[in-house]
Amino acid sequence: MTETTSSIMPLIAVLLPVGAALLVLLTGERYRNVRDSWSTIAAVVMVAVIASMLPDVLDGRVPQTTIIEMSPGIDIMLRADAAGMIFGLLASSLWVLASVYAVGYMRVEHEQRQTRFFVAYALSLGAAAGVAFSANLLTFVLFYELLTLVTFPLVTHRETASAIIAGRKYLAYTLFGGLMLIGGTAWVHMLGIDGTFVAGGLMADQNISKSTAWGLLTVLMVGVGVKSAVMPLHGWLPSAMVAPTPVSALLHAVAVVKAGVFGVVRMLMFVFGAELLREMNAWQFIAVLAAVTLITGSMLALRHDNLKRRLAYSTISHLSYIVLGVALLGPIALTGALLHIIGHGVTKITLFFVAGAINSHTHKENVSELDGIGRQMPITMGAFTLAALSMVGIPPFVLFTSKFYLGWGAAQVDQQVFMLVYLFSGVLAAGYLFPVIYRAFGKQSPDHPSYSEADLRMVGPLAITGLLALFLGIAPNLPFGFFDLAAEVARTSFGDGIPMTKGTE
Amino acid sequence: MLAALIVPVLARFRHELGYIIALAGVGLSSVASIWALAYVLDNGTMRYNLGGWAPPIGIEYVVDLIAAFVAVIVTSVASLVIIGTRRWADREAGDRLGSFYSLVMLLITGLVGMIVTGDLFNLFVFLEISSLAGYALIFLGGGRAMLAGFRYLILGSVGGSLYMLGVGFLYFSTGTLNMGETKEILTDEATARSVQAGAAFIFVGLGLKMALVPMHLWLPDAYTFAPSSVNTLIAPIMTKVGAYAMIRMFLSVFPDGYLKDIVPIADALLVLGLTGIIVGSVAAMSQKDIRRMLAYSSISQLAVIAVGLGLGTPLGLVAALLHIMNHAVMKSALFMAIASVRFTSGITQVADFAGTGRRMPFTMGAFTLGALAMVGIPPASGFFSKWYAVQAGIESNQWVVVFVVLASSLLTAVYLFRILESAYLHPLKPEPSHGDQHASGFGKTDLDMPAEVQIREAPLDMTIPTVLLGLATVVLGVFNAVIVINILEPGIV
């Protein structure tokens, strides 16, 4: 069983990026080398801090910090449970690479107002860590809203008309989602239920009426559905691609959207619980919605020539892999969904890094312009190839592992239909990613450029994440025990180690 | 018995002249209110009989937790605002500076008096004192302010008279003007027609003072055309005290449940409040003048207080009282910020705010905090009053309330992010006086290097209070549970 131990570590993990943001702000543009190293330092320390909690968490001792009473009877509380650890480790370790990449990208592109950019970038990591480690609904809402707020200046960073419009759209969607969450949270508390997350569902034994449960489910799922871009709440994500690529990479492939799907995990597994969702027969609706998004997202990705937009629709599709995996309400599917959070994070950040490197180096942003780019930028496109193979789900890449568990999970609960959905979407992923590889390596560029890679600060991180996509597929438990963590979440969510045989009863 | 210290302190200084004395007066009053709050927390309600006459005959001052709480807010905010707008006052009041500060002191005396009085007629007296001082201060703006002030004067006097009429009706039935005694007598014979009529008149009178829709028409013009030193002062606190007086009626004049069950004033407040939230926010969206926008925003925010009160549950009252504090702090931060911007550059139009975020980072930082609090982003203070209001709405199954309060956040975001977007994301407009060489062609393309924008903050004595108020929105938000548990929840029982 799990027990909680009082520890300041989760709080430190959340505050580290905030401290980094302050240092960045105080250092300012004049000493930009010093300024830009703060983020990387903070990211490395943050990984170390979170990883230091790992042995305890795997042993079932959950570190917890209670900060302050926020509303009578409701504390701001951070807790690094297994699910939170997955998201926290993923976000912080990718931040290490993204912080290096961002420096390269921003300098090469001569982007304006880099201090503001790096402040907001660091703050969003703090908010993401807060989302990861929130121990109850109100804390979750707090960080979820803060995440919206600090990412707004990143989306609108370029200050062009289209960036401002995208920013408005982003705010409208995410604030709406946040309000839904606020309403839902207030509702839970007014039912007299404690909002602290419990594996297996905090509403499990509360005897709430069916209509109330449905109302709550709708409100809360709409709230987290916005950031996880489940259709029809996905409209902000393609528009937000107007942001500089480091933002698209870390935030719109990892921190923000994963906060959304992580919220789905929290809501379904820790608020409602599999038992209640099965009683309500609610999971089918979520599953169908996710399946539709999954297929439609992949289809739309096929149509877009702009590489970043294509990746954005691919993200929408893959987020729904995760939502669907959770909604299937089986331990294996849940394990697969959590692995997919990690695998997709690593893979998609590589693809975005590549898109940014190509764009900043050659100013090409459309797939149709990429003929022969593989000869010019072999490392970059090599990483792209690794990531694309992972995306499609070729063994032994990381997304093969997660898709394998997702498909197995669907079979376990007798929902082979959804297994087919997963497989079909894999084919579609091949359809929108392999042509890029073919153009890059198989076609000749009209102007025969010689070998020239982008800035090392961009190529290095993307090569590492590309290799990670392969490495994590072979050894998902190294270095951070992701597989064990995912299994631990599944175990606690579905009762102690009892394997689920049938999903529907 | 030392409770009424607040009033004499103010009264002693109100005929004196000058900034120092005014500040000392309000500052002392603020200290006294804090002390009174601490005293009440330890020892329970303070009572003081003016002139030594016992309550039914003489005028009684009662400082309970709620009164002390609101008094602390009003006097503290007023002190900061007086510091921050000194330069405006110098500029605007000119040779009438002496009378300006006497009027300010009169205004605050009136407001604090309204807060601590335990007597219905005395409340009227203080209401009129503060209102008359308010009219006069608005008149200082000259020009269109004369018309705005006159309109306010007419409507305000109507409100005052209606309130007085209502009190008269109550007096016929009860034979007393003391609040506590009125409540006791009314508990016995509650259904008399005259009492009901009195309640209705009081409601309309105070409704005018707190700018409840559709009685809000005086407010936008008054805030827009009043001098900056004046609207910054009256916007955060004056309508709040009207709202406080309304709460006082619910808590200590009419018996529990009277205004809900026998005379449907709570429902009226609820309906008008919900309408006001929407009307105010929507009107705020389309305003070009930022002061006018904030004025409509005030109408919308006061309506939130009315809704909390109209729900009539303890949680609703907590929401209303907390929002009195939050809105006073947020609105003063916003008004102070725009007063500072106007001080350095003369800007009053929303469209001209472009680039101010870079030129005045601290002032606009405070504005941003105030705006986020207003939208209700946790952990800024505005979130929590809405949080309690939403909870109260769910508790009493008023889903409309939940919906409207949440929607108002979104509407607020629309009109405030307009400013933030303009201040931070649009390039600074070239100013003739500034002679910015980068101005031509700046902002045309993505790859433009940032033009060096010179930081031109307002003077420190304007910026510091602004920033303090901005930070206060966050601090009060984080520590809201302390206030709710220790002051508000015991206070409304």
Image: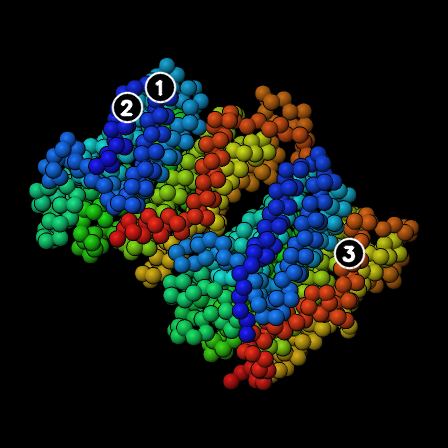
Q: Which labelled disc corresponds to residue B14?
A: 2
Give the percent coordinates (x, y) of residue A329. Answer: 56, 76
Please name the residue shown 9% across and 52% down the image: B189
- Using a 10 Å C-alpha cutoff, classify the residue at mark 2 as few (fewer than 14 neighbours), some (14 to 19) or many (20 or more): many
Q: Is residue B351 visible?
A: no
Q: Determine which residue is flagged by label 3.
A: A462
Q: Is residue A479 visible?
A: yes
Q: Amino acid at mark 3?
A: Leu
Q: Nearer the viewer, mark 2 or mark 3?
A: 2
- Using a 10 Å C-alpha cutoff, classify the residue at mark 1 as few (fewer than 14 neighbours), some (14 to 19) or many (20 or more): some
Residue B414 appears left or right of A408 = left
Please name the residue shown 37% across and 32% down the image: B78
Label 1 sits on a secondary structure element that is loop
Q: Same chain for labels 3 and 1? Say yes or no.
A: no
Give the percent coordinates (x, y) of residue B126. Answer: 23, 32
Q: Determine which residue is flagged by label 1.
A: B18
- Using a 10 Å C-alpha cutoff, classify the residue at mark 3 as few (fewer than 14 neighbours), some (14 to 19) or many (20 or more): many
Residue A466 appears left or right of A211 = right
Q: Nearer the viewer, mark 3 or mark 1?
A: 1
Residue A351 appears left or right of B107 = right
Please name the residue shown 51% across and 73% down the image: A200
**What is the residue that sits farthest to the top in this orientation?**
B95
Give the percent coordinates (x, y) of residue B443. Answer: 66, 35
The residue marked by circle 3 belongs to what chain? A
**Residue closest to the eye, A256 or B62:** B62
Asked if the residues shown at circle 3 and circle 1 are in contact, with their CB atoms under 8 angstroms apart, the answer is no
